[in-house]
Image (spheres, grey):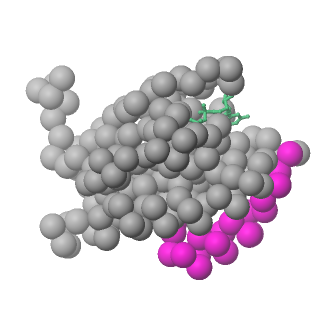
Amino acid sequence: DRKANPYSHLFKYIMVGDSAVGKSNLLLQFVDKRFSPNSDFTIGVEFGSRSINIDNNQVKLQIWDTAGQEKFRSITRAYYRGAVGALIVYDITRRETFEGLANWLTDCRKYSSTDVTIVLVGNKCDLEASRQVSYAEASSFANEHGLLFFETSAKTGSNVDEAFEQTAKIIFERTKNNP
Ligand code: GDP
């Protein structure tokens, strides 16, 4: 509860990207250190939160998940509204999810606030043998579009905290100088 866990900053993050790239599991891993291997049903997480410490400030990350809406491309404007961080997730083992990025980027730029920090996340990096998108290619896409870039595994937890936390540090610095 708020008394036990007060915070001085609240950052809304959204996650977008094609279906089954691992958005719900990234959230589950970051918030709860859990992974759900089941592919047969949507976990249906709608949002989760976790507080982290930045320069002795308690920063609460409130992370919104699409909960399957992306299948119908019916993500509402309310989803994007007020987001200071946006994670655009693709699956490194399915090239078509990388090809779909440009559309998600367009929507983020169109519907989020102008100064949203956008992060490209290549998930499932534990499945190296099935990789279809190289680190170099994704990294250069990120550079071209001014995005942060991380490869993660929601399964092993590799780089998951880093992706959420480094993004928060950047947003924190930005809002500190420009509240
Ligand atoms: P979403 O539709 O984008 O929210 O994707 P989910 O989180 O539901 O994940 C889709 C499927 O991919 C599930 O079967 C997950 O168990 C699996 N999955 C998610 N992340 C990873 C990962 O990092 N590595 C592996 N091997 N599987 C993953």
Residue 130, located in which quarter of the rendered image? top right
In the image, 53 versus 81, the foreground residue is 81
Counting from the top left corner in percent of width and height, residue 141 is at 64, 72
Quarter of the picture for ligand 1?
top right
Residue 51, located in which quarter of the rendered image? top left
Q: Is 119 on the left or on the right of 38, as rendered?
A: left
Q: Is 4 on the left or on the right of 126, as rendered?
A: left
Q: Is residue 135 magenta?
A: yes
Counting from the top left corner in percent of width and height, residue 125 is at 72, 46
Q: Is 163 on the left or on the right of 113, as rendered?
A: right
Counting from the top left corner in percent of width and height, residue 94 is at 77, 49
Q: Residue at x 48, y 25 (%)?
A: 44
Determine whether 157 is above or below 8 in the image. above
Q: Residue at x 69, y 58 (%)?
A: 98
Number of disc labels: 0
Q: Residue at x 32, y 40 (%)?
A: 62
Query: Which residue is farthest bottom?
Result: 144
Residue 30: in sight, yes or no?
no
Q: Residue at x 74, y 69 (%)?
A: 136
Residue 107: in sight, yes or no?
yes
- What's drawn in magenta, residue-wise? 130-148
